[in-house]
Amino acid sequence: MRTPLVRWSVLSVSLALALTSCAKGTGGGASATPSAGQFNPSATFQGTISVMGFGATDEIGTTRVDLAKKALGGADIKLIEGDLDIQQFLSSVAAGDPPDIIYANRDEIGTFASRGAIIPLTSCVKGEQIDTSMYDKDALSQVTLGDEIWAIPEFNQVQITMANGDLLKQAGLTIDDVNGSSWDKVTAAAKKLYKAPGGKLTVIGYDSKLPEFLPLWAKANGADLLSADGKKAQLNSPQVVKALEFAVGIYDEQGGFAKVKALRDSADFFGKGNQFAKNQLGAMPMEQW
């Protein structure tokens, strides 16, 4: 659910210009309401744009930054590397020295907006005549608070099931046993697929992907972690608790979360030494863009 306040791509360079046309500043405190200033569609930009939360450590990221620089007439773009550090960001706001742009998850935007840490983009969206109907309505609603748009959605992740066909076949299983539609089947498949000779886990039968995928399992059980207005946590609802028990139970059947995570973290996740290439994983849900 990534959401940048500027989407670094050639399709949105006008938005980058629009954001720099809006006034900067936060009023000096994380709890203060920053001034959005006056939108000026003809304004130009000179100087440095600081961006927090967007890493350009791969070819795609570097290309997107290069395109943004070109669109902004060679402006100096200063990247604060790594994923967004929320505490670092809020501290910079409180100190009166925030970044110009942040790249964050959509579920974080409401908190930032309510604390006055970011400025609304509604006037920029209108001034640049951005067609918001192009965005998924749920994605846009996640970045809308008090009738103001506070961020621009970038893309949606669609969870899919990834599985090792060879390991499934060896265990006498099919994709239907691990597609998540039956939690009992998933649990049974995990038991059949995992391998731990001498107590050392060498093959993860099924990775339920905690903690990141708890919202998925909760939703599958008819629950949401937050109320519809986004203001009330619902972590203790029976449906969420049951979903957590299931997802944790998958790990318990394979020696515990610590062992699964250790093997998972040791893999070359996106490289030639990934878990599927090395037959170290039977199946897992996975984000797909």
Image (spheres, rainbow, N blue to C red):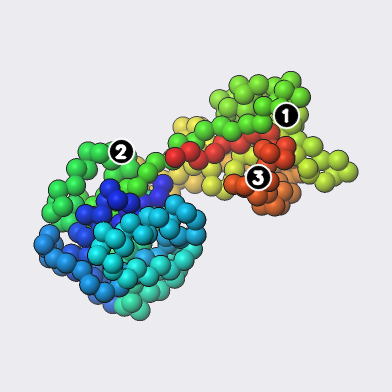
Rendered-image quadrant of the C terminus? top left
The answer to whether residue 188 is above or below residue 104 is above
Residue 272, which numbered label?
3
The amino acid type found where label 3 is placed reads Lys
Q: Residue at x 79, y 37 (%)?
A: 195
Q: Residue at x 74, y 31 (%)?
A: 193
As helix, strand or loop, the secondary structure at mark 1 comes to helix
The amino acid type found where label 2 is placed reads Asp
Q: Residue at x 33, y 56 (%)?
A: 67
Q: Closer to the camera, 22 or 27?
A: 22
Q: Earlier in the sequence, mark 2 or mark 1?
A: 2
Residue 175 locus on image (x, y percent) = 62, 24
C-alpha separation, residue under disc 2 versus residue under disc 1: 37 Å
Name the residue that disc number 1 marks. Answer: 167
Q: Earlier in the sequence, mark 3 or mark 1?
A: 1
The amino acid type found where label 1 is placed reads Leu
Residue 215 locus on image (x, y percent) = 49, 42
Locate residue 184: give its quadrant. Answer: top right
Q: Closer to the camera, 274 or 123?
A: 274
Using the rendered image of the protein, determine whether residue 90 is visible from the camera's viewpoint: no
As helix, strand or loop, the secondary structure at mark 2 comes to loop
Name the residue that disc number 2 marks. Answer: 136
Q: Closer to the camera, 123 or 254?
A: 123
Q: Residues within 10 Å of mark 3 (few under 14, many from 20)?
A: few
Q: Residues within 10 Å of mark 2 (few under 14, many from 20)?
A: few
C-alpha separation, residue under disc 3 versus residue under disc 1: 18 Å
From the viewer's perspective, is 89 left or right of 200? Answer: left
Q: Residue at x 82, y 46 (%)?
A: 200
Residue 281 locus on image (x, y percent) = 69, 38
